[in-house]
Image: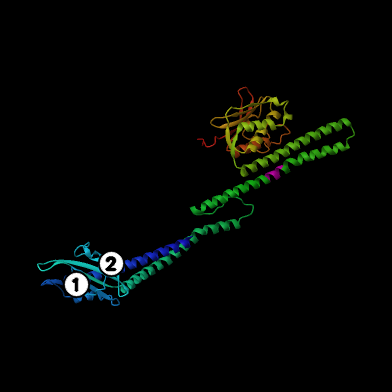
Amino acid sequence: MITLILIAGGVSVTLAALAYGWRAAEEAYDKLLAGSAFEIIRSVSVANDRIIVDLPVSAFEILALAPDDRIVYRIIDRTGRTITGYDGVPAPVEQAGTAGQGEAVYYSGEFGGEEVRLVAVRRLFVERSFVGEVVVVVGHTLRARTALAWDIARNALFIVAIAGLVLIGLTVFAVRSALRPLRRIERALLTRDPTDLSPLDVTAPREVETMVSAIDRFMGRLSRRVEIMQNLIADATHQLRTPMAALRAQAELAGEEKDAEQLRIIAKRIQNRAVGLSRLTNQLLNQALIIHRADATAQMPIDLRVVAIRVSDEIDHDLNSGQDDLRLDLPEEPVIVLGDELSLVEATKNLVNNAFRYGKPPVTLSVRDGRRRAIMVSDQGEGIPEGDWADSGRRFARTAGSAPDSAGLGLSIVNAVAEAHQGHLIFSRALDGGFCATLEFPVPGRTDP
């Protein structure tokens, strides 16, 4: 693109130089023609009703400054007759009187098969014996002025060429200097440890900062993906090993047990372990899925009432005594937030299941609109002690309100969904003494102070 711009600029400057050279040469030689014509017109006089012309040598000495050109002239009386000079010299179109006395009129014509440049001046005589005007036409060919035009253009182009070379050198230097940060970024990436996903520490000009920021954002997303994978592996290793070992031990005891009553007890323990292991596995997978969707899924307008209805249809009804124990409290108008419906449904299901598992019915699922939009789950139990509210959203957090078989992942999933939607997980006490967990979200398009 820079090369094309320079070529276009060079062509434009060349044309401008040629035009300037021709105009300068034309003005210079037109002044020579005019000087010669005025010398001649001053030498014209009237005597005895006759036009007398005493051609001055100085008039032709002026035109001799162009030695390679042919000089032509013609003096015309009031009747259009040639007094002296060449009859073939074209008369001016302004001879009829459109040009004022003493005013030079320039025009082009042809004489002897060659193009000539001409000037005409007129002089009005008002004598007793002669009344009328005399027109003097002087011209010469274009060889000298053409040579001068090319000479001026060549000199201008030489200066432009020198300036162009300097400009090209400066452009190459500027482009290389501007692209030098890209090489620093390349070296910084090539020499970096493969496990280092921290932001780039590279100084860059404003034009390259956007690219560095984009690389940093990409590395941040990649770092979160790697962290999700590492957390999943660590969580699976940490959390699944113990229940699987316990399940295997119970199975081995069942194989050695002969008493039917003890076998039933062991079978019940195996069932409980299997249910707990299944719940833990689902929570681990849900957490990895939700954190993954926070980066991979575009947020769309979601009606929180639809989320609440889906939760009421998909919750584990084995945890409560009946479907009627979950109460829905929904407004008539839509309550829209920007988010991922699957993530919001999974987070709300965790809150509802926790309310059924650890709280007391009835459990109410509410949606509220206002300065911030919210979906709330409340029950009549004591809930989490207030002193543990701040730490309840951490992975594997075990609070005083947790059951012994809790893995501590449910509220961590809810908290991760809230953060991915620029929201908050808030715990509070209801007016009737119950416990309330609320997911608050910003109103789309509104910036809170």
- Answer yes or no: is residue 173 visible: no
Marks 2 and 1, how far apart at CA? 18 Å
232 part of magenta stretch: yes
Residue 372 at x, y percent in the picture: 55, 32
- Span colored in magenta: 230-235
Residue nearest the viewer, comparing 22 with 286: 22
- Answer yes or no: is residue 319 visible: yes
Horizontal side of 252 relative to 18 (left or right) equals right
Q: Is residue 320 above or below residue 78?
A: above
Badge 2 or badge 1: first in the primary sequence: 1
- Secondary structure of residue under mark 1: helix
Residue 6 at x, y percent in the picture: 44, 63
Residue holding disc 1: 40
Residue 206 at x, y percent in the picture: 49, 52
Q: Residue furthest right?
A: 258
Residue holding disc 2: 107
